[in-house]
Image: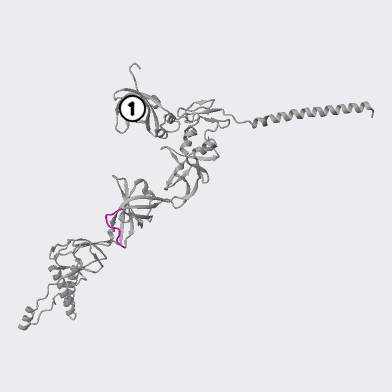
Amino acid sequence: MSNAVKTMLGVALLLVVAAGGYWYGNSSAEFRVPSAEGKAERKPLYYRNPMGLPDTSPVPKKDSMGMDYVPVYEGEAESGSQLSISVDKVQKLGVKSEAAALRELNRTLRVTGRIEIDERRLHTIAPRFGGWVEHLYVNTTGQAVTKGQALFDVYSPELVSAQREHALAQQGLAALKDADDDAKQSMRQLADASAERLKNWDMADTPISELPSPQSSPSGRGGERESQSSIPARPRVTFRAPANGIVLEKKAVQGMRFMPGEMLYQIADLSSVWVIAEVPEQDIGQIELGSPTQVTVDAWPERSFDGKVAFIYPTLNSATRTVQVRIEIANPKALLKPAMFANAQIGAGKAEKVVTVPTSAVIDSGTRQTVLVRLAEGRFEPRAVTLGSRSDDYVEVLSGIVAGEEVVTSANFLLDSESNLKAALGGMGEAPVGASLLANGNRQQAGSYKAGSVGHQAQGTLEAINDDSTVSITHDPIPALKWPSMTMDFALANPSLAANIKPGSAISFEIVERGEGEWVITKLQAQHEGH
């Protein structure tokens, strides 16, 4: 190969290498530029009002209450359901979270009640016949008695006659054992009739002490002198205690005359007593028969008495809106006295495990319940939830979140204010009616309005300012609501709205719907003449 050819090939190779280097350099520069931009600090698109008002700012600023406007970065403006807070701000607010978990809700209802006597252990002694009290064995109220113990003796001529007739009939029936059938049948009927009479008096098995023998005395003068000289004692019947207990009431007095059915003694067995507890209407559905209870009384504050729910009464007290619940408690030492006031703790709740969150995690506006779900560090999402049963510390979540999701339990109301929770719930494009109230510091009133509620303007006459913080207004037709002219009572979002307006003044006002069919005045001013 000639030198000229070699020279030409070398020059061509150099040109190819130079061209490749130039292309590679340009390509590397093109790829490096985006990388440099990716490392650059993100710049906010704009700053939005922290209270949900429909105003933004291109530069950082503070609102009228000194709160910083919240920066909105590219990609975040489109997410109206999530909230982003800087990590530093989260730490300053003291945000804490806890995972939703499956738990058994063991709630304790604390109610008041009173100690009552067990009605099944109350005994009344009232003879079914008339007579006289001959002697008292138990003569003081409050005295303890045992079953079968003698209480008092009575004398009753009617009872003595009935007992004697029955004894004579029994003896006659025995004497006629060899007589014909008709005679025995007549005597048997007489014996049965006398026995039935004693049974009706509840004295069939009660012996009469010192009852004279029905047999006649022997004939003759000697027998007459013996009968006259030995006068039998007056027959009497002894009444005995039907059960162990104490004498609650004693009306028997020695020597007194009593009528049939008159109560002479009342005895109560206090080894077991009742607690009649008053349970509020809204809690009665959580109580079941057999629910365990603990009862305390002021007389023994250091002790508690175990019992269980034995009966739920079927009626409601319309005055107190409570339902009575009967609790049975063993009282072997008689420490619990009838008519004592008692405090009862009744176990309630579901036995199965359900999804629960701490009660502090729920933001309740009155018409909606919301929790803040922690998606990542500094990112949160508000969720509307449906709640079920409650315990002292936890509440059941029927829908909205699942077990394992982190919910904010502390400083959630601060996040609500700082991160515009109301706007996230109602839509970034709408300013909730409550936002204007929030801007004026009225957080309590603003939290109860529907997100995105619309205000309606109206005019009328202020008729009266009522004692319950409502006003009576005769308003003109409101076309937006298709309301004709009428006189209505409206609640005030703030009582100060009507402070300087006198009844009879022409007014203009704005109303919003706080709940279903519940309208509230958010603005109210008097109309001056010429307007």
Above or below, 460 against 163 in this view is: above
* Label 1 neighbour load within 10 Å: few <14, some 14-19, many 20+: some
Name the amino acid type tagged 1. Ala
Name the residue tied to disc 1: 498
The image shows a total of numbered marks equal to: 1
Indicate yes or no whether the magenta region holds residue 302.
no
Viewer-side residue, 425 vs 445 = 445
- The residue at the point 74 percent across, 29 percent down is 27
Residue 476 seen: no
Above or below, 63 against 530 in this view is: below
Residue 392 in the image, given as x and y percentages of width and height = 42, 48
User: Magenta part of the protein: which range?
Assistant: 333-341
- The residue at the point 29 percent across, 23 percent down is 504
Viewer-side residue, 433 vs 237 = 433
User: The N terminus is located in which quarter?
Assistant: top right
Please, which residue is most extreme toward the right here?
A: 2
Residue 283 in the image, given as x and y percentages of width and height = 37, 47
Q: Main secondary structure of the magenta part?
A: loop
